[in-house]
Image (spheres, rainbow, N blue to C red):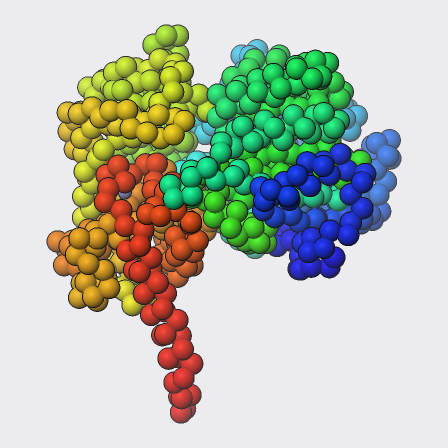
Amino acid sequence: MEGAGSFGGSGGHRLYYLNSLALDRTAEPWSDLLDAGREDGRLVREALEGPGRADLVPAPQELHPELLGALQRMGMERLYSHQEQAIHAAWRGPTIVTTGTASGKSMCFNLPTLDVLCRQARARALYIYPTKALAQDQARALAAFGLARRVRPAIYDGDTSRETRREIRRSSNIVLTNPDMLHVGILPNHGAWEDLFSNLAVVVVDEAHVYRGVFGSHVANVLRRLRRIAAAYGTEPRFMLASATIANPVELAERLTGLQDVELIDRDGAPAPQRRIAVWNPPLTDEAAGARASALGEAAELITRLVRSGARTICFMKSRKGVEVLARLVSDALQSTDPDLAGQVAAYRAGYTAQQRRELEGRLMRGELLAVITTDALELGIDIGELDAAVVVTFPGTVASLRQMWGRAGRRGRGLALYVAGEDALDQFFCRHPEDFLERPVEAAILDHESELIYRSHLLCAAHEGPLSSEDAEFLGPRWEAQAEVLVSAGALRRRPGASRGAYVPRSDGGYPAAEVSLRSASPETFAIVDVSSGELIGSTEAARAQSTVHSGAIYLHQGRSYEVRELDLASRRALVTPFSGDWYTQPKRETDTEVVRLLDRRETLGVTLSFGEVSVTDTVLAYQRRRLSDHARVDITALDLPPVSFSTQALWFELDAQELADSVSLEVMLGALHATEHAQIAVLPLLAMCDRWDIGGLSTNHHPQTGAPTIFIYDGHPGGIGIARTAFTRFEELCADAHALICECACADGCPSCVQSPKCGNLNEPLSKAGARVVLARMLHEGAGADRAALRKPPAVV
Ligand SMILES: [Zn+2]
Ligand SMILES: [Zn+2]
């Protein structure tokens, strides 16, 4: 049974492929179900993870005696080895811990923090959580130490009442908050927090992998502002981070905090249950068109069978509507045969009140529920007890979050982690490459704190928090002054008369720039999205994207819920929406132009000239198409009359040789070949950079006026760019190889949603030539391989 190597990067658990199935499966409640899947080919791959024994070591005796006493009372005289290592690492310098789900990660930062607080009565700590629910969970965990005399944790977020806020500022020594509150509430009012900043010993950033893309680029700036204010009050807090498994934890920690030499703790000493991993692909219903049975129906059948066999199951889905539908399908199916069980299935999603959620969590903990179907509201570290099976329906976007969801399974020493594939390109790519899925180093979390618009908006916030001077290079980076000059030209900052060179202050004393900066938007220019049925502001979108995402008639998805746009008001920058329950979605038809503004890097590879730089993208939304949800069939197309919108961002582009291209594909399919190549590359880019295909744009043309050649552009979809195109530029060869595999291995006749069709194509997937793209990519990869061979054949240089 010893098949292959270890589970890449997951911290030492071994993963075995089941070549022979000589394992004793009789004890597992899901044996029959898996047997059936093996028989009819829906079960496309299995692997076995663990079991791993706990690596226990004594708690460091240097810890404060009261803390050691608390550990003893909690029955934790011995710690997992990674917890002990993390304590020592935290004493040395900044750290990041990336051990698995349920490995006791929070102990890794709680113990060093509590140790400091036990020793120094005045010391304070700041814990930063991406969601309120997680902060609450952590506050409960801290209370469990029973150190009330020394440790006074308190949550400070939007829900904290005015009266308690003052008390927290005065006396709480662990303040649990979120990046938004830090950005808009705490840092701009640092004067009121003087005691905290003057004694700030520790900053904890948990779930750090969440801080990527636009949000991460903002949070990296907020944390730099935090270090700067702490320094102004004379402190240099120790940073401790924790994250799910990602490809680049140290890089992420350093980019987020601006600190160097962050130490990584990733050798997991927690016991691992034996977990069976199964990849399940719904059967093809039409091979030529690439159509498959629905993942939802397949998941309903699987969960029903798991519940019947007594397995406590959690199921994750992206959309709220999907969650509701699936929960209903399962309880209906159970109703006919086992009515008692039907009541033990529940849906759990964001949008429930805090009390409803608490109640469901409680029922889950006590084992009163057999199955819970949820959006990723439950993905993060909330403690819901142990479950037998975790079912993930369609790819959640990143392998990192898939593994986190799978990590929920494994009660009584064994578990089932099941992935039910959808028809999207990445889902089907993984079904054909399960090894990649299981072993591939997970994606890198990408962010760019110097993305210009984001950086400048925080520089202005920083100036309001205290005059900018040459000492700020330490926190804000070497380029701060050039950007400050831009803000001077824009009338937002001024140089202080008489002050030494480089002292900048806001032009006006009033104003509150932090309130204008949303941490989820790449540009300060946004459109508000208002639900007119309730009057509620449900969110905002970048102005540059408003016309393509919230034009009138658009179906807009927000936190898994659908809305229909009634009106897009360009003048007042508002989209008015109402809740939507119809059975169609919309796709805008756009005309896009890209203009190269600045070349930043260039190299020759795979027989093409590959460039990276700044581009200006101009988009005109011409019309939108309605399509049926069930089978993607076109319903109709409606013209729109909207002005063009431009934004600048980062892009890679590559030029192909027109003559060589004409030799390999006919003129009629040339544009379709380029277009399909672009789509395939965009589809697989999330394998390299943690992002969504909706974060990426593309353009292909037979002849670009600036390059004078057939050219494909792939650009960051957010103004300013957040590092996605740069990653694609650096790892272009992998991108082409993955795109080629995606196309070659899809069994469809001329392109389908599992390979070259894109749900967000501005040209409504026309023209597309799957065969042509195959030739283009094969030729490039062949050139690349040829070049490598040539390099090998070259005689060694004579020195
Ligand atoms: Zn296909
Ligand atoms: Zn397209």
**In the image shown, does 391 or 85 lie closer to the viewer?**
391
> In the image, is residue 659 above or below residue 451?
below
Question: What x and y, as percent, mark residue 122?
Answer: 67, 31
- Furthest residue to the bottom? 798
Quadrant for ligand 2? top left
Residue 464 in sight in this render: no
**In the image shown, does 43 or 100 lie closer to the viewer?**
43
> In the image, is residue 103 above or below residue 346?
below
Residue 649 falls in image quadrant: top left
Q: In screen coordinates, is 751 left or right of 224?
A: left
> In the image, is residue 789 above or below residue 445?
below
Residue 739 in sight in this render: yes
Q: Residue at x 71, y 23 (%)?
A: 370
Split into 4 quadrants, where in the image is the C terminus? bottom left
> In the image, is residue 441 above or below residue 286?
below
Residue 632 falls in image quadrant: top left
Q: Residue at x 53, y 37 (%)?
A: 282
Question: What x and y, as percent, mark residue 478?
Answer: 37, 51
Q: In screen coordinates, is 695 left or right of 639?
A: right
**In the image shown, does 402 or 627 lie closer to the viewer?**
627
Split into 4 quadrants, where in the image is the N terminus? bottom right
Q: In screen coordinates, is 716 left or right of 488?
A: right
Q: In screen coordinates, is 294 left or right of 707?
A: right
Residue 532 falls in image quadrant: top left
**In the image shown, does 421 or 359 lie closer to the viewer?**
421
Question: What x and y, as percent, mark residue 78?
Answer: 84, 43
Question: What x and y, as percent, mark residue 782?
Answer: 36, 68
Q: Residue at x 42, y 39 (%)?
A: 286
